[in-house]
Structure formats: structure tokens, C-alpha cells
Image (cartoon, rainbow, N blue to C red):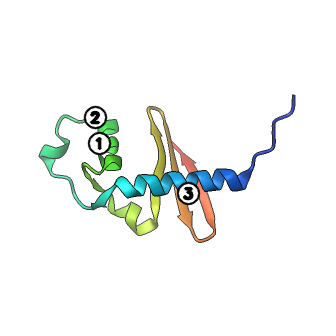
């Protein structure tokens, strides 16, 4: 069975929609206070950033980057720059 062709325009539109939805919840860039992150795991810190509980990171604002997916062991980052979009997996 051969793989189905990917509708790249649909995938790109989904990534942009996810990025816009995440951005709508995020707080402006800033620095979290120690008491805000004390006792949190790395995943909990990211969840707090994406929910707007903690300030977003400056580099994301500077570079126009926003994570579109964050799950234990799987982080995809959508980078919208000009006409292109990249996906980085960690």
C-alpha cells in the first residue's frame, strides 16, 4: 500500500491556525519570578507559558516563533518567517 499524498496547503493552514490559537492565550514576553516556577517540572513551565500563566519567552517574540505542539517526548515548533514554515522536533 503506497502512502497517501499530503495536502501541504492544508497542513500549513492547520499549523498557522494552531500557532494563532496558542499566541492568543500567551502573555507578553517577560521573566518569571522564582516563586512562580518553584516546584514545577519543565513540562509544567511550558504549559504555564502556553496558557498565559507565565510570561512568554523573548526569543519567541523576536523570532516570530511559537510552539504548536508540546507533549511528553514530542515537541514540534512552528517557525513562520516570510513565506516559509519549518518544523523542528526535539
- Label 2 packing within 10 angstroms: few (<14), some (14-19), many (20+): few
Of the pair 3 and 57, the residue shown nearer to us = 3
Closer mark to the observer between disc 3 and disc 2: 3
Looking at the image, is mark 3 or mark 1 earlier in the sequence?
3
Q: Distance between the residues labelled 1 and 2?
A: 6 Å
Residue drawn at point x = 28 percent, y = 34 percent: 41
Tag 1 secondary structure = helix
Q: How far apart are marks 3 and 1 (CA)?
A: 23 Å
Closer mark to the observer between disc 3 and disc 1: 3
Q: Residue 45 carries which label?
A: 1
- Relative to 72, is 23 above or below? below
Q: Name the residue under label 3.
A: 16
The outermost residue toward the left is 35
Left or right of residue 11, residue 53 in this image? left
**Total number of numbered labels?**
3
Give coordinates of residue 10: x percent, y percent: 68, 52
Residue drawn at point x = 14 percent, y = 47 percent: 34
Looking at the image, is mark 3 or mark 2 earlier in the sequence?
3
Left or right of residue 58, residue 22 in this image? right
Give coordinates of residue 31: x percent, y percent: 22, 58
Of the pair 37 and 48, the residue shown nearer to us = 48
Q: Distance between the residues labelled 3 and 2?
A: 28 Å
Q: Residue 54 carries which label?
A: none
Residue drawn at point x = 81 percent, y = 35 percent: 3
Left or right of residue 46, residue 21 in this image? right
- Label 3 packing within 10 angstroms: few (<14), some (14-19), many (20+): some
Tag 3 secondary structure = helix
Q: Mark 2 points at which residue?
A: 41
Q: Are marks 1 and 2 in contact (CB under 8 Å)?
A: yes
Amino acid at each position: 500500500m503506497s502512502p497517501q499524498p499530503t495536502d501541504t496547503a492544508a497542513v500549513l493552514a492547520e499549523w498557522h491556525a494552531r500557532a494563532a490559537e496558542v499566541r492568543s492565550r500567551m502573555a507578553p514576553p517577560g521573566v518569571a519570578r522564582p516563586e512562580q516556577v518553584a516546584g514545577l517540572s519543565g513540562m509544567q513551565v511550558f504549559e504555564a507559558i502556553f496558557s498565559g500563566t507565565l510570561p512568554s519567552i523573548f526569543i519567541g517574540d523576536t523570532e516570530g516563533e511559537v510552539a504548536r505542539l508540546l507533549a511528553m517526548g514530542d515537541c514540534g515548533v512552528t517557525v513562520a518567517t516570510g513565506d516559509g514554515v519549518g518544523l523542528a522536533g526535539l
